[in-house]
Amino acid sequence: MSGTILGVIADDFTGATDIAGLLARSGVRVSLRIGVPDAAPNGTSAFEVIALKSRTAPVQEAIDETRAALAWLRDAGAHRFFWKYCSTFDSTAEGNIGPVAEALMADLGTDQTIYCPAFPENGRSIFMGNLFVGQQLLSESPMKDHPLTPMRDSNLMRLLHPQVSKPVGLIDRLVVAQGVEALRDSLSQHHADGTSHVIVDAVANADLETIAAACRDMPLITGGSAVAMPLPALYLADGLLSADAPKQQLHDLERKTIVLSGSCSAMTNAQVDAYIARGAPSYRLDPLALSQSGPQAVLEWLTQQDLGAAPLIYATADPAQVKAAQAELGASNVGALIEDTLAECARVARDAGARRIIVAGGETSGAVTKALDVTQLDIAVEIAPGVPWTYCTSGGTQIALALKSGNFGREDFFTLAQNKLDTP
Ligand code: ADP
């Protein structure tokens, strides 16, 4: 047994499943905790991920929660740490990326860390300190209009500077391209100059390999999920992780399945259309009808379904329909109404024997896991980059959950997910 090596703290839930899924590509067991567990660590995995909901929380609250997560992970035996935030560096001038990083550095007694939100497989790259989404600068991408964290600058040094108290520097792609030693030398130089916060360019997976190799001994790495991907193999090579560390096994679960979609992202709309076109039984939630008559109709429909046919319940709608429902009921009311209804559907389906639950939507996933009383997930097979199947216990029985944030996966996601659990 290697015990826990790496402790990851993620600032939101689907971000946590994203990094957990990438670490699990190594085959080693990865556990994800929703919030800081109340109980002391016991029987923890080599890789432990704690999902917080701190991305847009007040700065001090985010710091306090993250420090509590760090303390739990240290108790679990972790001796390397990763602060995971969004690959589009979602933050405001106040934080929370920088202030949380400085709090973690203080607790860990370290005075240097790196920032690498690049995720080339998903089109996020950093060049000369500027973050790109596909071929667009971050500030010209749809992220410029994000309702909570509009990203109006693409330069990570400028974005990070107001969030931290110590100097910010850059190691650019020209240095990264020279390899591990050059990167290490540059980090030492920055350290000697008192530069605590170092942005590191990366445009391809090979850059991430170099960065992870050069930084693997740092107490704290910060970034998107992708720069953590090479860590398991490096830990294995270093002897930190033993080759016989427990692997995640596939469980033989009944095929009864429910698909729940509360996401209205463009990709989810396409996934719902494709699944219905395949002939899947489906029920569309109408927010106005729900607000008037409650969830009885959908729950009745659900109890009449053959769960072997993996029926779909969806609220997914195009932007005009969403706007109309929001105008009628208020945006947060309609969101909560649908989340509560889908969460109730998940509970009813589980009680009716569903052992595989597929959920589309980040907030929707949070509502479903809460309703199912799930606090810990073991990461299983990957369905799409950033979306793994997970195993958990709910209502005293083992189930599999696939939790997908809006824009992840391809059009055939719901079908692919079902196939993957049987033939990874
Ligand atoms: P995503 O990951 O795509 O952002 P989320 O589940 O995080 O998905 O957010 C989608 C939000 O939209 C949820 O609060 C959900 O309840 C709400 N929603 C879903 N369908 C509708 C609809 N038809 N009208 C209005 N709001 C909706």
Image (cartoon, rainbow, N blue to C red):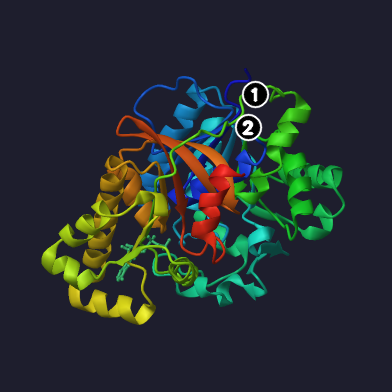
Q: Nearer the viewer, residue 400 or 33?
A: 400
Return the mark for residue 245: 1
Identity, as a three-letter code, of the amino acid under mark 2: Val
Residue projecting furthest to the top: 1
Q: Horizontal and vertical percent for residue 312?
A: 37, 60
Cα distance between the residues tagged 1 and 2: 7 Å
Residue at image location 36% in from the left, 69% down from the top = 316
Is the residue indicated by label 2 positioned so its CB lies within 8 Å of ligand 1?
Answer: no
Tag 2 secondary structure:
loop
Q: Nearer the viewer, residue 384 or 21?
A: 384
Q: Quadrant of ligand 1?
A: bottom left
Q: Horizontal and vertical percent for residue 320?
A: 34, 82
Picture quadrant of residue 4? top right
Q: Horizontal and vertical percent for residue 231?
A: 69, 38
Q: Horizontal and vertical percent for residue 105?
A: 56, 38
Disc 1: CA contacts within 10 A as few (<14), some (14-19) or many (>=20)? some
Residue at image location 41% in from the left, 54% down from the top = 309
Check the image and report above or below for 147 versus 39.
Answer: below
